Image (tube, rainbow, N blue to C red):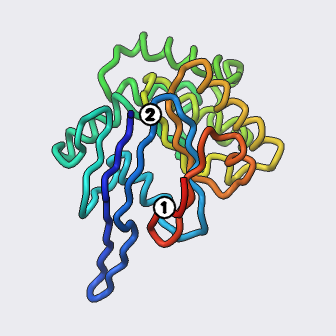
Amino acid sequence: MIVKAQQIGKIYRNGPLRVEALRDLSLEIAEGEIIALMGPSGCGKTTLLNCLSGLDTIDAGDIYIRGDNLRDLSERERTNYRAQHMGFIFQDFNLLPVLSAIENVELPLLVTKVPRKQARQRAMEMLATVGLSARARHRPAELSGGQRQRVTIARALVNNPDLVWADEPTGNLDSETAGEIMDLLLQLNHERHQTFVIVTHAQEIGMLAHRVIHMRDGKITFL
């Protein structure tokens, strides 16, 4: 198993208010799976993704990534772990507007001290993989929504991560473009054997995923 969560809990506090976002939740994810996390808004899907990826911490239980317990890692160690082994795809793209497509894609490599020439080459290769090599010098404002999401996918995969976390990756796209993006993710999963965990409301993504995990009120209702 590439991901294993055991009886994890997450509580948010705001003064006297106490919100139990995750409740005694356990799951396992196998290497190479495409998992769709589904459920109503506010059920804890994004909180679970953030905790599993180490972006947020848990208050109870344990999370293991490739056998490493995230609770044993410092914040800096978790940051380095994400940079080396994980990729992230966001609904709002989170591209830097002043950088070109290729500059956005190469950024994770430069952060991890990959030489600039090598980073540029790998970024161009990833843009070619997602069908955007002709748009390498364009800034986000000069790209369509679907093209921006392809840049986001290229950035997420440029470091060849074991795990890719996607939070509503088609949420801002029309149905045709959303279908193209999902086809691309399926192709990349097949070719690169990477694990994708996708938070989504889209039934179409649930139908294409290898497995659907349904959530409600911070718990898994069925796998």
Q: Is residue 164 left or right of residue 133?
A: left
* Eye-nearest disc, 1 or 2: 1
SS for dot 2: strand
Q: Residue at point 76% right, 35% down?
A: 180
Q: Amino acid at mark 1?
A: Ile
Residue 53, how many percent across, how many down?
37, 45
> Considering depth in this image, is 76 or 33 the residue closer to the camera?
33
Q: Is residue 79 above or below residue 37?
A: above
Which residue, as the protein is rendered here, is positioned at the far bottom?
A: 16
Which residue in the protein does label 2 denote? 163
Label of residue 220 in the image: 1
Q: Quadrant of residue 21?
A: bottom left
Residue 73, how many percent across, how many down?
18, 43
For marks 1 and 2 on the same chain, the one whose residue lies earlier in the sequence: 2
Kindly tell me whether residue 125 is visible in this rendering.
yes
Residue 193, how many percent across, how many down?
53, 22
Q: How many marks?
A: 2
SS for dot 1: strand
> Considering depth in this image, is 16 or 152 the residue closer to the camera?
16
Q: Is residue 81 above or below residue 72?
A: above
Q: Quadrant of residue 77?
A: top left
Alpha-carbon span between mark 1 and mark 2: 21 Å
